[in-house]
Image (cartoon, rainbow, N blue to C red):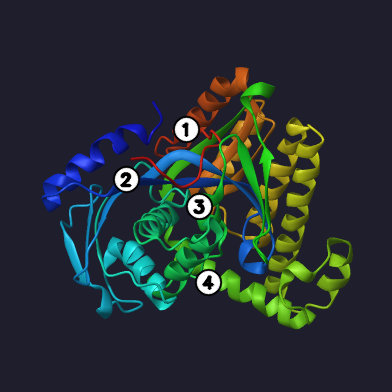
Amino acid sequence: MTPGTAVEATVADRFRELYGHAPEGVWAAPGRVNLIGEYTDFNDGFVMPLALPHTAVAAVSRRTDGQLRVHSADTDQGLIQLDVEALEPLSDTGWAAYPAGVVWALREAGHAVTGADVHLASTVPTGAGLSSSAALEVVTALALNDLYGLRLTGEELAVLAQRAENAFVGVPCGVMDQMASACCVEGHALYLDTRDLAHRQVPFDLAACGLRLLVVDTRVKHALGDGAYAERRAGCEAGARALGVRTLRDVDHVRLPDALRQLSDETVRSYVRHVVSDNHRVERTIALLDAGEIRAVGPVLTEGHASLRDDLRVSCPELDLVVAAANEAGALGARMTGGGFGGSAIVLTEADTAQTVTKAVEAAFAAAGYTAPRVFPAVPSAGARRVA
């Protein structure tokens, strides 16, 4: 049974208890883990996420009275009721800002969404860098798209969900998380150009190759991460201005040394070095996968972690320990994934050594006095879909 199956089986029943009628449907949207390409999406760069089997599930029905009622099985806040015409960006609505922001973004785009009853439940770990918020946004957007007959594509829903998070919630994220949740395909990774949303489904059948991709949730989130994402985004934008380009996407890897010599600010220089190099790492990874050289991706992951740790400075001791312990135990490669300062790392390993690697990471955490990590396989899964 996949992590979302049990939730899908019960969410409609809970909806009936809450609202006194059956939902018009049930939808699911997954969290994601990013194989390679970190902090590149807001620079118009390349990323390569894959969807997880962990999902946000929503039972939804339309309303015609302008009311949005939302409830989550994962909080103790109870039923929240909002007036869709009174929705305001950056209002303090807690977790409800994610579905409310989607309704706001749809209405801002001219879609006549007149309200909804929503019950949500999620198996995407929160605080682990696996895009639990994007899953909430995308599942809401897909449900309303279907119920209101909006005929929006997955790409269009992802952009609207990103706008909800940027403008309504106030988080300056790129579009990768929402695109992954909306558009991924089972058994594949998503090669995405975030400039124009061109994308390609790349076969990523680890099991057939005797491999496994592990997610190691460190279960920590350091306060240093508060505001750090926005600061790094601003630094990248400053670097692009100094180099006279639209975004760092426009700095070719072959001219990176020349570009770095033009930058006087060492912090900006290190951010530029990471972004341009990580874009190149995505392209190298694609070339390896297209050539059937999946194992050779491992060292690219480890190289990416060093860049995130040293140039972008978004790692932390727990993430560094995962990478070091896994590689010492025979993993093919590992890196932190997501925004950093805690959250999760990924580890590429042979299937028959996955248990050894897992135990080595767990032992290293115990020896360091850290909370035991949560380790599970990242199985490339389907994107957002209707399930009932």
Q: Residue at x 18, y 71 (%)?
A: 65
Q: CA distance from mark 3 to mark 1?
A: 25 Å
Q: Is residue 305 left or right of residue 133?
A: right
The residue under the point 58% across, 45% down is 320
Residue drawn where x is 53% and y is 58% of the image: 153
**Where does label 4 land, which residue?**
230
State how far apart marks 3 and 2 are (Cα): 15 Å
Per the image, label 4 sits on a secondary structure element best described as helix
Q: Earlier in the sequence, mark 3 or mark 2?
A: 2
Q: Nearer the viewer, residue 377 or 272?
A: 377
Q: Amino acid at mark 1?
A: Val
Q: CA distance from mark 3 to mark 4?
A: 24 Å
Q: Which residue is mark 1?
A: 375
> Residue 385 — which label?
none
Query: In the drawing, does residue 59 fall left or right of residue 242?
Result: left
| Marker disc for residue 182 | 3
> Tag 3: Cα neighbours inside 10 Å, few (<14), some, or many (≥20)?
many
Label 3 element class? helix
Residue type at mark 2? Answer: Val
